[in-house]
């Protein structure tokens, strides 16, 4: 049985998709604030959302939930997330072969045209 603990605790949920990309969302929670004065979501929680969305974009291309492992996950932050905002991550798997998959995407809080960060990830396919 799959471990649903992390996604349930973080509130990560499906948001939208197309044949090329998927979006997952994580609502703001006081439990995941790193600086109470700023009120924005902690980087660790956002990184978990980014990793989950990148992995799910690979499932979309491979046609199902097949084993894979994150090898590299990089986020380039462009600005802080807005306080008390839901974070949405859009990711696409743009290249894959028998052993690896490459993804890219963004995280945003209001509109994709103003991203919080850009993300790239590499996964080993099992």
Image: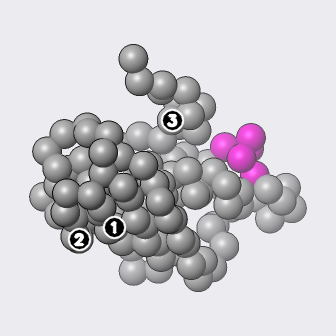
Q: Earlier in the sequence, mark 2 or mark 1?
A: 2
> Which disc is residue 7 wearing?
3
Residue toward you, 29 or 23: 23
Image quarter in which the N terminus is found: top left
Residue 60 seen by the camera:
yes
Q: Where's residue 40, x and y in %?
A: 71, 61
Answer above or below: position of 77 versus 8: below
Q: Earlier in the sequence, mark 3 or mark 2?
A: 3
Classified by dominant secondary structure, the portion drawn in magenta counts as: helix
Q: Earlier in the sequence, mark 1 or mark 3?
A: 3
Inter-mark Cα distance, 2 to 1: 6 Å
Considering the numbered disc 1 on the image, is that residue within a helix, a strand or a loop? strand
Q: Which residue is mark 2?
A: 94
Residue 24 seen by the camera:
no
**Are the two marked residues, 2 and 1, in contact with CB atoms closer than 8 angstroms?**
yes
Looking at the rendered image, the disc whose residue lies closer to the viewer, 3 or 2, is: 2
Q: Which residue is mark 1?
A: 103
**Residue 57 image-quadrant placement:** bottom left
Answer above or below: position of 51 versus 120: above
Q: Where's residue 91, x and y in %?
A: 34, 63
Residue 32 lies within the magenta run: yes
**Are the two marked residues, 3 and 2, in contact with CB atoms closer than 8 angstroms?**
no
Which residue occupies 62% across, 67% down? 81
Tell me if 110 is positioned left or right of 23 in this view.
right
Q: Residues within 10 Å of mark 3 (few under 14, many from 20)?
A: some
Image quarter in which the C terminus is found: top left
Inter-mark Cα distance, 3 to 2: 24 Å
**Segment colored magenta:** 29-33
């Amino acid at each position: 049985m799959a471990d649903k603990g992390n996604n349930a605790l973080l509130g990560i949920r499906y948001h939208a998709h197309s044949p090329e990309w998927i979006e997952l969302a994580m609502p703001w929670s006081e439990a995941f604030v790193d600086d109470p004065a700023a009120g924005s979501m902690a980087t660790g929680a956002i990184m978990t959302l980014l990793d989950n969305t990148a992995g799910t974009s690979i499932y979309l291309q491979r046609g199902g939930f097949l084993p894979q492992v994150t090898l590299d996950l990089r986020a380039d932050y462009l600005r802080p997330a807005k306080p008390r905002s839901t974070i949405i991550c859009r990711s696409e798997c743009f290249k894959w072969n028998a052993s690896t998959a490459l993804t890219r995407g963004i995280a945003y809080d209001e509109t994709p045209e103003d991203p919080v960060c850009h993300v790239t990830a590499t996964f080993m396919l099992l």
